[in-house]
Image: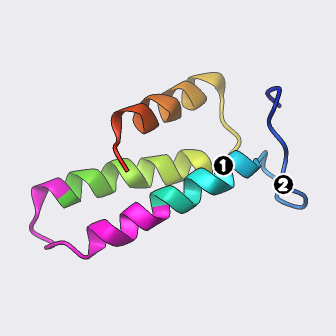
Amino acid sequence: MAPGKKEVEGGGGGTTVEDKRKTGIVQAEVDRMKQLSSTSGYATQRLRVLDKMLELLSKVRTQSETDELEILFANMSF
């Protein structure tokens, strides 16, 4: 586990406190996007990216997946 990261007790799967916080942020954005029109190209594409982020947050990641997740967060505005 990376320095400064705490594993959530009983969380398993390498889930950290920071991952829990990020998951909450992403899930709130998913809920917001689902309120938009289902024909919205913006909402559809953003939901794809958010789903990928949730997938990465929910598992033990390789270094390349961790890097990908950080890039996704850097390019999204919440």
Q: Is residue 56 above or below residue 12?
A: above
In the rendering, at what x and y percent does residue 72 appear?
A: 41, 36
Q: Which of 63 and 71 is in front in this view?
A: 71
Q: Disc 2 designates what residue? A: 8
Q: What residue type is labelled 1?
A: Asp
The residue at the far front in this view is: 78
Dot 1 falls on a residue whose secondary structure is helix
Closer to the chain start, of discs 1 and 2, is: 2
Q: Where is residue 29 in the image (x, y as percent from the top left)?
A: 38, 62
Residue position marked by numbered label 1 in the rendering: 19
Residue 17 position, x and y percent, is: 75, 51
**Which secondary structure is most common in the magenta stretch?**
helix
Looking at the figure, which quarter contains the N terminus? top right
* Place of residue 42 in the rendered image (x, y in percent of width and height, measured from the top left): 15, 54
Magenta-span inclusion, residue 23: no
Q: Residue at x 35, y 41 (%)?
A: 76
Q: Do the residues labelled 1 and 2 touch (CB within 8 Å)?
A: yes
